[in-house]
Amino acid sequence: MQPSQHGGNVLQTARELGLEPEALRDFSASINPLGTPDEVMAAIRASLEQIQHYPEIDGASLIQALAEHHQMAPGHFVPGSGSTELIYLLPRVLRPRRALLLAPCFSEYARSLAQIGCSVDYHLLSAEDNFLFDPLSLLHQIRPETDLIVLANPGNPAGTALAPQALLELAAGIREQALLLVDEAFVDFCPDHSLLPHLKHCDNVLVLRSFTKFYAMPGLRAGYLAGAPHTLARLAQAREPWTLSTPALAAARACLGAADFRRHTLRVIPQWRGQLQKGLQELGWRVFPGEANYLLAHLPPGSTKAPQLAATLRAQGILVRDCSNFVGLDETYVRVAVRRPEDNQRLLHALRTLT
């Protein structure tokens, strides 16, 4: 099995370039450019007084906080040390036999399924459709033996998003056959697209959420699964103890209370995304209409390919995500995160010098 390849390798890249991490501009990982909320940092600092003790064995305080935040029973939630822990936990416990992944998508879905011998099929989304899909047409392409469907909303790396009603139609169509896992790692940037408020009516849907992206804390792992209690009870029983550290639990709980931060993010990110999109389009890039804090772009014909473009920018201390290793994409696709306007202008200036 090939090693994982992802964006966000800031610390390693800084060492290799002989730079301080702060000197890099990381557009390869889609992290909220506003940084970690002040109340989250305060909660982390306060929690350090408790690190001489073991953390909660199962993250009970976070489960209760999630229940109150989403106004659902605690049994609807299982926390994890980042959503990646839960991506690997789910196949180990539920043992799907054949999965359908909507691609391009996060590579860890397939890696986690391969580790238990689950067969994986891909439904390739089309650039002509902005990497969206019609649920009813998808239903006709599902094999009879498929028992798990995995997708992200908004999609990664495309950033385009489906309305909850479309996903509810898909879930209803596969209810007697399969589970639907919806990765909502970026849905906080477009909260109206979340399926989580509808889970009380969907016993075959699991929603995966992360604190990493929106709250800018990838170095402190925390996420959760939401779904039907009878399914999540099996996952909770199989989890290793103490996977969430005391600082991670404190940070996650504080994230739920960061209402002002959420409002500010939802106000400025669309503005900055629009400015960046316009700048990339002026370079001749085809930019897909993302709803999150990143943009997928198709490079113009005859231009530098994504691997070389990424390498050239890297030498200048600018990291972008070469998307050539995503299933369904090739070396003509690049993903860039939305950062603060001054950083976005630095990227655009660097790109102009290369054209």
Image (spheres, rainbow, N blue to C red):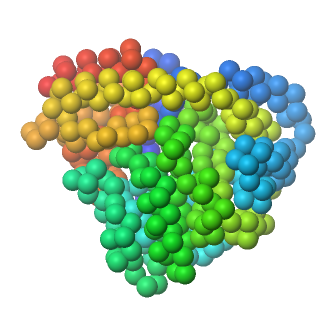
The residue located at (77%, 45%) in the rendering is 68
**Front residue (pair 173, 351):** 173
Say above or below: 140 vs 345: below
Q: Is residue 157 left or right of residue 266?
A: left
Lateral position of residue 246 relative to residue 153, left or right: right
Task: Name the residue furthest left.
Answer: 302
Q: Report the residue at 87% width, 44% height from top.
A: 54
Q: 74 or 108: which is nearer to us?
A: 74
Residue at 32% of width from left, 23% of height from top?
A: 275
**Residue 170 spot, x, y in % from top left:** 46, 68
In the rendered view of the protein, which quadrant contains the N terminus? bottom left
Specify whether residue 252 is in view: yes
In the image, residue 211 lies at what x, y percent? 62, 40
- Farthest right residue? 53
Q: Quadrant of the C terminus?
A: top left
Residue 339, x across and y down, in percent: 43, 25
Is 243 left, or right, of 351 in this rendering?
right
Can residue 317 be seen in this snapshot?
no
Residue 21 against residue 111 in the figure, above or below? above
For this rendering, which residue is in front, 74 or 192?
A: 192
Nearer-the-camera pick, 99 or 268: 268
- Whole-percent x, y for residue 90 in the image: 62, 65
The count of marks equals 0
Residue at horizontal 44 percent and vertical 45 percent from the top: 6
